[in-house]
Amino acid sequence: MKKLFKILGIIALAAVTGFSMTACPPEAADSPAKPEKYITVTNIPPAYNNMIGALKLYPLNSSNVAVYSTEEKISGNSVKLPLFNWAGEKPWLGSGSYRIIIFIFKDKKEAAAGQYRYKGVIAENAITEATTAIEWSLFSSN
């Protein structure tokens, strides 16, 4: 009989622990805020399909990066790049004219090492919409 109560006690303890864990909300993860502005680069040459694209935006007449994108996979000859503030790493909500540099990397490993396959520049482009589309042909090799 003593053994039966011990087994029932263990089952009850496990049930109480399980119910208390499901009743508590999960801890908030340190996930970054969702971006609100994007640049979509279209008509990328097929040679770069399935590689990784990223952007840096510089205010005109400045050498300081103001905005960056995360590295995203190029698919179907285009890539949609979310924009973030360089300082503070929060979603970028601004607008205006910027010098834009695009980087193409073979994969995330090369991106982390800064080993790009292509680097192109647009001297000036206005960013005014939630998603701004830019044609690949506007970039000049750098």
Image: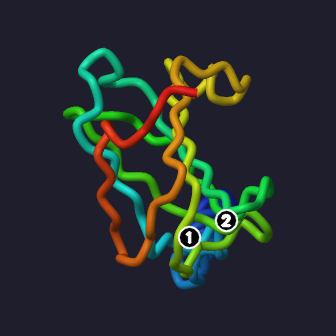
Identity of the residue drawn at 23% across and 37% down: 43
Element type where label 2 sits in the image? strand
Mark 1 Cα shell of 10 Å, populated few (<14), some (14-19), many (≥20): few
Q: CA distance from mark 2 to mark 1?
A: 54 Å
Residue 28, how many percent across, how many down?
Answer: 65, 75
Residue 53, how many percent across, how many down?
Answer: 47, 36
Q: Earlier in the sequence, mark 2 or mark 1?
A: 1
The answer to which of 45 and 50 lies nearer the viewer is 45
Identity of the residue drawn at 60% across and 22% down: 116
Residue 60, how many percent across, how many down?
Answer: 66, 63
Label 2 with label 1: CB-CB less than 8 Å: no
The part of the image, by quadrant, that contains residue 42 is top left
Q: Is residue 5 visible?
A: no
Q: Is residue 83 left or right of residue 133?
A: right
Q: Can you identify the residue that label 2 sits on?
A: 59
Which amino acid lies under the numbered mark 1 shown in the image of this protein? Gly
Identity of the residue drawn at 54% across and 80% down: 93
The part of the image, by quadrant, that contains residue 128 is bottom left
Q: Is residue 127 left or right of residue 6?
A: left
Which amino acid lies under the numbered mark 2 shown in the image of this protein? Pro
Identity of the residue drawn at 67% across and 68% down: 85
Q: Is residue 112 above or below residue 84?
A: above
The answer to which of 36 and 33 lies nearer the viewer is 36
Label disc, if present, on residue 18 of the rendered structure? 1
Element type where label 1 sits in the image? helix
Q: Is residue 46 left or right of residue 13?
A: left
Q: How is the image coloured?
A: rainbow
